[in-house]
Image (cartoon, grey):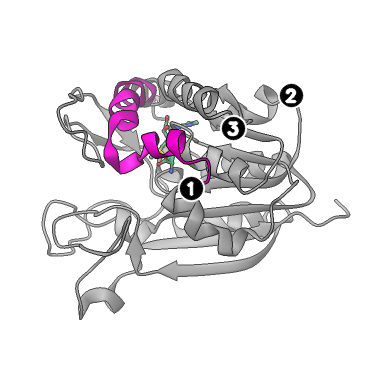
Amino acid sequence: MADQQRFIDDNRAMWDDRAPAHAASRDYRVEEYRTDPDALSTVVAFDRQWLGDIAGRSAVHLQCHIGTDTISLARLGATPVVGLDLSPASIEQARGLAADTGDEVEFVVGPVDDAVELLGGRTFDLVYTGVGALCWLPDIDRWGGVVADLLAPGGTVFVRDAHPVLLSLDDEDDTFTLRYPYFETDEPITWTGDDTYVDVADHQVADLPSHEWNHGLGEIVTALLDRGLVVDHLVEHTWTDWPPWGLWEPVAPGFWALPEPLRAHLPTMFSVRARRPSST
Ligand SMILES: C[S@@+](CC[C@H](N)C(=O)[O-])C[C@H]1O[C@@H](n2cnc3c(N)ncnc32)[C@H](O)[C@@H]1O
């Protein structure tokens, strides 16, 4: 059995290090939330087509990082809204931003695995997560249990995240070499490096280890189905919210895709939506 607590502790330290730099990065557009009360993250602005009308509905955002997507859910009218993240420094940024903007969002520090306990058994109409989230969780079946327990009867979970096929490819060159496991493994994929996925300008980020686990698309969907959730949306996409490596080209503000004719060769993200039946 891998030393999962050490891996999670390493990940917390890495995300704590990145949080202030991400909050200062123009890619997260944090200043825009302060000056424009209608500003939304590109992630939530895109996903709202699949969320339906969330005005007046309760929502929890798992792995909320510095809170930009979470605040966006509140700006679409969700209430109450809670964001949860492992990293205290990320939550500090999220709380600071919400205090400045006046958006009513509660932020909670802790691992997804403990979310039900940390949220006092509360349940929500929407569980929202994704865009660089599931790869930080060692056990996707356990995640499915947490999601189901957080859902109110009739509630919906929506996830849009990196496709596990994309995550199994070598990201150092453009040869599409199958380098990492596609299915969940006990041992993580360990990374080091003093870089991150957004432009942090003159902010430094430290060279710290981090650990990821891939989960096959079937494993992710099965984790939800096994809890009796009803999947009513499953789509594989050809674009991402970040450029995974050099070959990718911008296709819209905040979105990248492979150049043609490669676009049809690779699923890059997936989205899944599932509902807890009203009677359970
Ligand atoms: C790339 S961010 C994803 C959030 C969002 N899409 C964004 O870009 O703002 C990943 C977040 O997952 C959090 N995280 C990693 N492992 C976690 C865990 N086991 N439980 C809760 N949060 C975790 C990190 O602290 C980080 O803030």
The residue at which mark 2 appears reads as 120
Indicate whether 54 appears above or below 177.
above
| Mark 2: amino acid | Gly
Give the class, few, some or many, for how many residues have Cα within 10 Å of label 3's Cα (few <14, many ≥20): some
- Which residue lies at the image location 76% right of the left edge and 37% below the top edge? 123
Q: In which quarter of the image is ligand 1?
A: top left
Magenta stretch, residue numbers: 12-38
- Which residue lies at the image location 19% right of the left edge and 72% below the top edge? 259
Q: Does the magenta stretch include residue 31?
A: yes
The residue at which mark 3 appears reads as 103
- Residue 277's x, y, as percent? 80, 57
In the picture, measured across the screen, residue 95 lies left or right of residue 17, that is right
Q: In what element is the residue under mark 2? A: loop
Q: Is residue 44 visible?
A: yes
Q: Can residue 138 be seen in this view?
A: no
The residue at which mark 1 appears reads as 40
- Residue 91's x, y, as percent? 48, 23
* Camera-side mark, 3 or 2: 3
Q: In what element is the residue under mark 1? A: loop
The tag on residue 130 is: none
- Residue 85's x, y, as percent? 50, 29
| Mark 3: amino acid | Asp
Q: Quadrant of the N terminus?
A: top left
Mark 3 CB within 8 Å of ligand 1: no
Q: Main secondary structure of the magenta part?
A: helix
